[in-house]
Image (cartoon, rainbow, N blue to C red):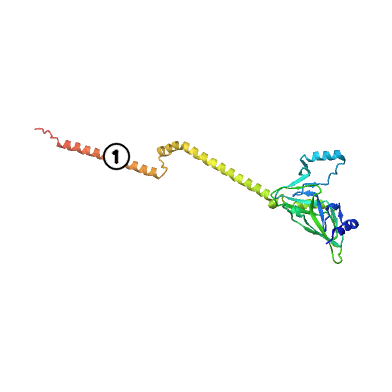
Amino acid sequence: MLGNASIKDYVRHSNLIDNYDEECLRNSSYRLRVGKLIRPGGNNVLDFDSEEENQGWSGKIWRKIVAAIPQNQGGFKIVNNRYELKPNELIIFQTKEIIKMPLNLSATYAALDSVAKQGILLINASMVEPGYEGYLSGVLLNFSSRSFYFTPNMEIVKISFSEVNGDVEDRLHERIDNYTEQLQEKAQNYTQTFLDIDRIEKDVISKTAHRVRRQFVWGGWILLFFLAFCTLEPVLYKYIWHDSWVPLNSTQIELERSIQKSKEKEMIESLTKKVDSLELKLKKNNARPTNSKP
């Protein structure tokens, strides 16, 4: 693994790190800074280096005034020159530095400990092959319960270099000129949040609201039916039971039978009385003496 003196030699003689800043150099590593941020979907790109810094004291004062005003740049909401990464959100970063690897060096990069301790996970820590020339990138996930803020020239990952033993055939020599465009294309495969929680939450809320709304509608119709039935029940009862003599239930059927039996009994008693009355009259007529002529 190269120490900082060897890294500086490679920077001087081989231009190992373009946009090099010695403040980012450590004992055996170099801290790479954020140059661009790309949101999942690939449509929004925030370039921290897109605007040149204004010169002079008046320009600096003006920049401070403007920075305090919320702005939208490339679809990103920027406040005080900071971009907020909310909990469970994903973001893709592109480094400010360009790495130009000679064939006798390889490198690996990983998240800074200071960043990881804030709950930020670098999903794709990787290796840089000999002969590679271009930017580096990574996918960051906010696993914490608090927002994380990106600022211009912010150190995000560290890279360490190692010498390769033996000769290296120049098979993997790469130079990526349209690196940002390729990142935007790959960003279409990602969701805004981890496990697409936001979309799932919205779907659950939408489906739940639809079911509740549907149950309220059905409940309203059922309630309306019962209210209408209770209002019209006396009329329906009078029409169905008294007028049409159509029984509505077993109790009414039994009642109808009782009434019918009572009527039959009354009719029999009436006929019996009439028969008895006629028999009595016949007996009286038979008991009268007949007047015979001489």
222 on left or right of 247: right
Task: Give percent across and percent down for residue 70.
Answer: 76, 40
Q: Which residue is mark 1?
A: 266
Q: Quadrant of the C terminus?
A: top left
Please tell me in which quadrant of the rendered image residue 265 appears: top left
- Count of number-bearing discs: 1
Whether residue 116 is visible, yes or no, is: yes
131 on left or right of 80: right
Mark 1, other Cα within 10 Å: few <14 / some 14–19 / many ≥20:
few
Q: Quadrant of the N terminus?
A: bottom right
Q: For the residue labelled by badge 1, is the local secondary structure a helix, a strand or a loop? A: helix
Task: Give percent across and percent down for residue 290.
Answer: 13, 34
Task: Give percent across and percent down for residue 133.
Answer: 85, 56
Residue farthest toward the front in the current orientation of the protein: 27
Residue farthest toward the left in the current orientation of the protein: 294
Amino acid type assigned to the residue bearing label 1 in the image: Glu
**Residue sitting at 28 percent across and 41 percent down?**
268
Whether residue 129 is visible, yes or no, is: no
**Residue sitting at 25 percent across and 40 percent down?**
272
Task: Give percent across and percent down for residue 3.
Answer: 84, 60
Between residue 217 and residue 254, name the one nearer to us.
217
Between residue 270 and residue 143, name the one nearer to us.
143
**Where is 56 relative to 139, above or below?**
above
Please tell me in which quadrant of the rendered image residue 108 appears: bottom right
Between residue 8 and residue 266, name the one nearer to us.
8
